Amino acid sequence: QVQLVESGGGSVQAGGSLRLSCAASERSSYYCIGWFRQAPGKEREGVAIVYAGADVPLYADSVKGRFTVSQDNANNATYLQMNRLKPEDTAMYYCAATEPGVGCAFDPVYFRYWGQGTQVTVSS
C-alpha cells in the first residue's frame, strides 16, 4: 500500500510560482501518479498525470504551459512546479497513485491512494 505526503503549498500573488512535492512510501514502475485539485464547491479536477518513472506527463488544458511535473525516482518523489499562477488556481492540491496495472487518466476514480492535500492560494 502506497502512502503519499504532499508539501509545498502556500499563498502567493498572481503571477508567482510554487513547487509542490509528493513523497511516496514506495515506488512501482507500473502505477500512475496524478495531481488533482479541488476548490470549494467544485468537483475534484485532474491537473497532471504521469506514469511513475516515466518522462511524459499529461496536463489539463487549464494548466498546460504553466505547470510542470518532474520525478525523483531515487527518492520516490514527484513534483509539481506551478508558474504564472492565477487566482483560479486556488484550491487544495492532492497527489494520488493508482494500483499497479491500472491505467493513467484524469478521472479520480482510477486512483486508490491519496495524500492529505496541501492548500494553494493565489491572490489577485
Image (cartoon, grey):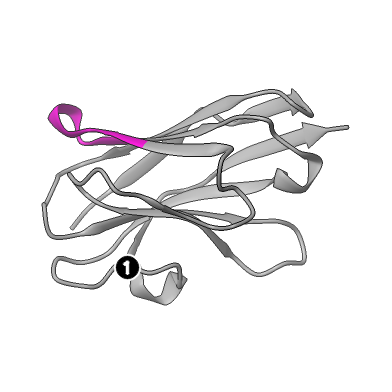
Residue 89 appears at what percent x and percent y? 70, 45
- 35 versus 25 height, above or below: below
Q: Residue at x 65, y 70 (%)?
A: 43
Q: Residue at x 46, y 37 (%)?
A: 68
Q: Residues within 10 Å of mark 1 (few under 14, many from 20)?
A: few
- 55 versus 113 height, above or below: above
Name the residue tied to disc 1: 112
Q: Residue at x 59, y 65 (%)?
A: 44
Residue 27 vs residue 67, the one in the foreground: 67
Q: Is residue 75 magenta?
A: yes
Q: Residue at x 18, y 58 (%)?
A: 1
Q: Within the image, what quadrant is residue 30 found in?
A: bottom left
Residue 101 appears at what percent x and percent y? 14, 71
Q: Within the image, what quadrant is residue 39 found in?
A: bottom right
Describe residue 52's horizontal placement relative to residue 124 as left or right.
left
Describe residue 73's horizontal placement relative to residue 113 as left or right.
left
Describe residue 111's horizontal placement relative to residue 13 as left or right.
left
Q: Is residue 67 magenta?
A: no
Q: Which residues are magenta?
A: 70-78
Q: Within the image, what quadrant is residue 11 found in?
A: top right
- 107 versus 78 height, above or below: below
Secondary element under disc 1, as helix, strand or loop, is: loop
